Amino acid sequence: MRNKLIQKIMYSCLLLVMVVGMVGCSTPTAAPTEAVVAPTTEAAAPTKEAAAPTKEVAAPVEDVKKFDGVELTLASMTDQYVSAFRYLIPLFEEETGIKVVMDELGYVDLYQKLTADFVGKTAQYDLMTVDIVWSGEYATNGYTLPLNDFMARDAAVTNEADIMPVAWTLGEYEGKQWAYPLAGYANVLNYRKDLFEAAGITPPTTQEELLAAVKQLTVGDQYGIALLGAKGSAVAQDYMSFLQQHGGSVLDESGKVALVTPKNIETLEFFGELFKYAPPGSTDYWWDQRETAFRNGTVAMMEGWSIARAGYENPEMSSIVGKVDVTAAPVSAGMEPKYGFGGWGIGINASSDPQKQEAAWEFIKWITSVDIQKEWVKHDGAPIRRSTLEDPELVAMYPWFPLMLNSFENGDGDYRPRIPTYSIIENALGTYVNAFLVGQETAESALTKAQEQVVANTK
Amino acid sequence: MNQALGKSINRVLQSKSYVVLLLPLLIFVTLIAIYPLFFSLRISLFDYRLTDPNQTQTFVGIQNYLRAFKDPVIFISLKNTLIFVLGTVVSELILGLGLALLFAPETRIARFVRSFLLIPMALPPLVVGLVWKSLYNADFGVIPYYLKALGINVGRGPLGELNFAMPAVILIDIWQWTPLIMVILLAGLKSLPNEPYEAAYVDGASRWQSFIYITLPLLKPTFLIAFLTRTIQSFKVFDTIYATTSGGPGQATTVLNFHIYTVGMTFFDMGYAAALANILLIVVAVISIIYIMVMSRQQY
Amino acid sequence: MIQKKSSIEKIVLIALSVIAIIFFMMPIYWLITTSLKFGRDAFLLPPQWLVFDATLKNFREVLSVDKTFMYIKNSLIITSGTTVLSLILGVPAGYALARSKSRLVGNSSYFFLLLQMIPPTAMLIPFYLIMRDLHLIGSYTSVILLDTIFDASFVVWMMRSYFADVPKEMEEAALVDGASQLSAFFKVAIPLSIPGIIASALYTIIYSWNDFLFALMLTSPKTKTIPLGILASFSSVEISWGKMAVMSIFAIIPAILISLFLNRYFVQGLTAGASKG
């Protein structure tokens, strides 16, 4: 305690020196007062207080005045849905008097920035978009607020039955909802209908047909399929996606990490086989390069998230306008169809003060409500509700919605396990699947080494 | 008399007035940096995982340091780091000296070019990495396109081939940081005295001779700075690797700092990450101090 | 520079300059063209260097949606704050290191070197916690303070070597004339070391301008810097290259202006150096 005091005194002295020293550089603007964050000591115990609001269930939600002057900060990923946020936030502010400041962050920085905010309990962000795979980590550490109390209280207005069951995986961990469904992505197979017609074949319905089509469509400078091969999360996620389509899994029945199984080895060999018909540079493709390869017309097929679909019809972004169609991502022959599901939830910072948490829940309820979801999707958001996916006006705009509905109905949000150690699994697969692809390892030795690395880091 | 005066001046000069000039920085730096240094030293002796819900910190002594010797990635990444540092620092010093000499004349064009050469440095290394990753792309990158046109087989592209990934990453670093060496050396060149050159001219020395026997020795202190700066920065390389190869293919470009990042920010194993960071610190410190000692011995 | 160059030599020099310019400018030129292209054309082969379907769409989008000018303003504040502070603290300290023969002072230079060697990834969390306890997260001050640690440590080393080159006799002469030590430092030593100061300034400007890690951790949406603005063009599906290129250009322009301006002082340094003799 005394040390802390001394430390604080020293720092205050230092600051004094600084202020004197910084003449002329930034005195008027330095340390903007609004940016000062909630005092840390008080922020330590918000979870207890958060339970309190549930008692005042009676408080009518229409009593919007109580949020006047509340300002929320939202950390949003710069996925397409960010433009929907940009459009909708002013409407929300007008309706409720709650001010929402959005900070748009790329994938690289969002995660790091949020981690620092959570670990330091600084509550810089009240609301944040949460990648489906982060749920386990956030839950175990209590970074975000479990929303179940709020959900139970407002069940009458949220129409939860309308939200696709698979969408709840966007934030669920061990029975609690650590983030609310926001934007659901389905893994689909995009293909060039012109090339398929020219070759006289139909789009593949099984993985075996996929391989055959990939071989047939690789001619000259034209390649069969674009894949993610770059070391790191790219190759790991693509492999896990194919694993899901072949009925494999990175976990065994008891939930333990089990990478070295016959099925997984076989799928890795299949994955390697596909790479022979992918553009030569594929082993360093990230999502961006895979998209470019497809939009440039270099490849005939690409599996990917449904959210990118609209972009292929935009003549400013794509050279293949009107030549693309989309179908369900094929599974192995004889398998019950299951489709990879991913996307983003929206969570509330556990360290924010209760009033802000209440206001943040207000925002979540509003943005995910049936009416607003329609606007959300129209402005490049991604759907989570059945009513949105079946809305006639939207289906006319996005003819692939019925397919997405089907993919969501048979969606599998667990092929990338939402457990706290996910990043360790992803890292190990990211290193060794890539090593296999560049010929450093065999399928079996790659998975064995990946397994060893996971075990070594998850004691 | 002159000597006596010189002595008394020296005595004054060596008195406290220098401390007055040094002290503000020393105090400032100590206050801000001492806690993180202490934190990192302390945490390296603990088993501390960020993902542990109870945030327990168990004292494990030097266990984390011993673990490093059994970590297979350490030796690969240490080797890669040394190759990277050697490759970047040597080429940047040579090319930087070349650029400094080339653009030293105070002509309008030279000054103009000099300013534009600073652009690579003004871009965040992460962006530089991504731009080069695109330029290197085997399928739609500009560089392989021209290589292919020359009949060269690019295979998986510079970043995808085990043997070429490291040189390709080194080239990015050279592109971004050679201009810095140029600036540092240029400043050194500009403050060189004229007399030795005049004397050499009178003695009939060729320009090459005066370059070898006058310019290079006089530039030595500046070289030391350039060398130290780039060595230290090179050891800490992270963004460029992260944006281009993530240490791949396989482990071909996994450098120590990238491994530290993985351990700390992916495995959240803060204790071990801190131990690795301290090991890196020691490696850089030893190399720098050896270099300084060698240089100063030659000087006097 | 005293002797005349032969014409072969001149041709070789020009050729080398052209190669250097092409090597260093090609990626920049690629960025500039990308900023003027539609997304679909960015990666077309053969590369379109000169003739392409040009558009100002990316610029319009960035200027209408993103707070680019706010980012630039923030970057300018942080960069100038860091540079001024690093020079104020670093230049005198460098002088002290160059002139003092005391062992303690000399050895403290290794401390500054050590500071530069700290891998920032390992220091992020403790730095973050300090700034939190000082209630400085989201302020310019926090980024300036941390950037200054690393930049000033460099300035010390840089200036130590320049002051070592400045002949002591001139300061001694000034002292004989009755000047105080401090004024000898300000009036004699500093003017003679302008090129070194400029180089140090350029270094701190460059490093604080594109500092990513500290700015990422310590700024708020209102104090975000331009590198962070650039990073916002990466989504989980793709990179918006047009937007990234535009932001990069905005990040480059101030740097060019600053260096064009500072370059003039290299010349002044030269004349000051010449007057030494």
Image: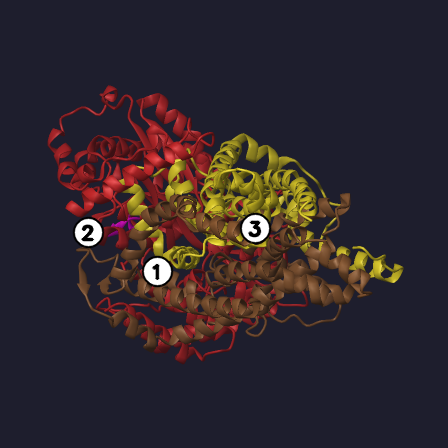
Chain colours: A red, B brown, C yellow
Using the rendered image, report if marks 1 and 2 lie on a common chain.
Answer: no
Side of C109 where C41 appears, left or right? right
Which residue appears farthest toward the top when viewing the image? A65
Residue under numbered circle 3 = C168
Side of C159 where C35 appears, left or right? right
Using the rendered image, report if marks 1 and 3 lie on a common chain.
Answer: no
**Residue A323 percent across, percent down from the top left:** 61, 51
> Are circles 1 and 2 on residues that touch, CB within 8 Å?
no
Which residue appears farthest toward the left when viewing the image? A55
- Is C86 one of the magenta-colored residues? no
- Pointer 2 indicates a residue of which chain? A
Compared with residue A157, is residue A78 higher up or lower down, i.e. above or below? below
Q: Residue A450's quadrant in the figure?
A: bottom left
Can residue A141 be seen here? yes
Residue under numbered circle 1 = B266
Decide which of C130, B287 is in the foreground and name it: B287
- Is A169 one of the magenta-colored residues? yes
- Pointer 1 indicates a residue of which chain? B
Residue kind at label 3, given as amino acid type: Lys
Labelled disc at residue A56: none
Residue kind at label 1, given as amino acid type: Thr
Residue kind at label 2, given as amino acid type: Gly
Residue under numbered circle 2 = A175
Element at label 1? helix
Decide which of C131, A397 is in the foreground and name it: C131
Numbered disc in front, either 1 or 2: 1
Q: Residue A236's quadrant in the figure?
A: bottom left
**Residue C43 percent across, percent down from the top left:** 64, 53
Which residue appears farthest toward the front when viewing the image? B1
Decide which of B83, B200 is in the foreground and name it: B200
Q: Which segment is the magenta one?
A: A168-173
